[in-house]
Amino acid sequence: MSANVENKTDEIALPEEEIFRQRKDKLQRLVEEEGYNPYLIERWERADFLKDIRERFDHLGVDEADENANLTIAGRMMTLRKHGKAMFANLQDETDTMQLYFQLNAMGEEAYNFAKKWIDGGDFVGIVGIPFRTRRGELTLLVKECTLLSKALRPLPEKWHGLKDTEIRYRQRYLDLMVNPDVKDTFRKRSAIIASIRKTLVDHGTLEVETPILSLLAGGANARPFVTYHNALDSNMYLRIATELYLKRLVVGMFGRVFEIGKNFRNEGIDTMHNPEFTLMEVYWAYADYNDMMDLTEEIIRNAAKVVGEQTVTYQGVELDFSKPFRRVSMLDLVKEYADIDFNTIKTDEDARKIAREKGVELKGTESRFGVLNEVFEAFVEEKLVQPTFVLGHPTEISPLAKRDPENPDYTHRFELFIYGSEVANAFSELNDPLDQRERFLDQLRKKEEGDEEAHAFDEDFINAIECGLPPTGGLGIGIDRLVMFLTDSRSIRDVILFPTMRPKA
């Protein structure tokens, strides 16, 4: 058996809406002339997948066929080229793409003419055929039977040559997945990364739980929430900004180790690192501290890197090494290293603001010296933290849920993990002193009354919970989307979210 098959497509220069109109007319004629409505087909007995076929019949030589292999497959016609008594096509299923060879003699005149007349690029078909290798060395299926399973009324994007417009790719992800194999690979890796995180935590005896997405209070982080309205309760409610406070309630309730992987929502800007809807993993272990959480973070990330490749990855041309212990360094030391400011020697808010302004940092003018420290860190340090770095010792003022450092109560036992200049994880030795927690919530309430929309809400029930007793606890949150970005070399967070938030069309 031989076929000189070329992988080409018909060139169609018609506008999409004209193609849509023509295909609707074609569908109507198919029903009227043939009595065949593909949308009435309910199932197809698929026995084989293209990736498996490629592996099973890789041994076939040029012009060699396996006449005994009667394969049954299904997928979408990605290309279709018609020539008299033969047609050539590329079929795609969820595992691979493979060339098809339609021949009048192999199919019979009636079946061949039906396929030639009624099938278009983008249609779903069921195929029965045998594998062979063409003279050009391409593994191909000789079609014996072809069943039209579903009609595509709209053409594949950009004449099947690939979809490049990022606006269309994000808004119509189904088109992106159809024609860009790398995109499907990214989301398969995302799934593997999440499964790896879940396995690592379960292997440590951590119980997976689910907590509310709708709440009367938005707590667990400093962020601006989304507000909605519950008709039956006649009350405003908030989409959660974090799972922290509910998960710590469960530790109070004697679940020793709990975690949740789920959606969180923050009413903030959209850029390459931020999407208002994002996926966060949070875990809490009783009797652990933030040092244990650092060890756990390294383990989680190394295991996730292994399932999609190696522990050393290339992100946007930069090599990131997850195989070595991550650097652990205080915010104070980093600011001294990169901004040449020693905040240990600054004793007043005015002096801190003056020094920061001299360095070019824009301030509101009301910041304390601890707030200024954080502003300087963001301005001079964050972007320098390319390799995985644990930043320790955040000011108490900006860490309302973290334990104070007993040797320096103005700072906390907290860390943030930075990779390639972006925060990926945040963790504390959790504050379990209800009296201190109440005072910090009151301080946040004052900030909110002064106009800080991201200040933490006052949660009386949470205080009541820890008044019942919260054991020493280590807590950790990891941004799944950003981690997936780094492990899959994806430039934007929109590249790792199947349906990212988009501006409404004008």
Image (spheres, rainbow, N blue to C red):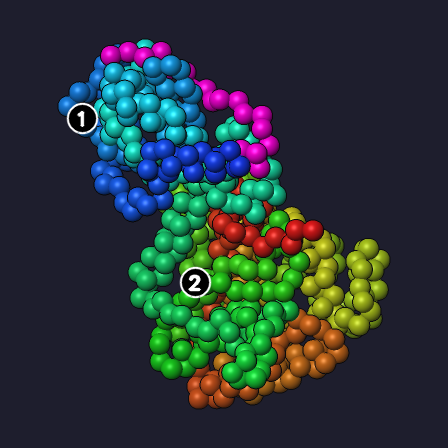
Element carrying mark 1: loop
Magenta stretch in the rendered image: 1-19
Is residue 17 left or right of 69 when viewed as pictured? Answer: right
Residue 139 percent location from the top left of the image: 31, 21
Residue 54 percent location from the top left of the image: 29, 27
Between tags 2 and 1, which lies in front?
1
Q: Quadrant of the N terminus?
A: top left
Question: Which kind of residue does numbered mark 2 sit on?
Answer: Ile
Element carrying mark 2: strand
Foreground: 422 or 369?
A: 422
Residue of label 1: 69
Asked if the stretch drawn in magenta spans residue 421, the answer is no
For residue 117, above or below residue 499? above
As drawn, the label of residue 330 is none
As drawn, the label of residue 261 is 2
- Could one spot residue 137 in this view of the protein? no
Badge 1 crowding class, 10 Å Cα cut-off, few under 14, some 14 to 19, many 20 or more, is few
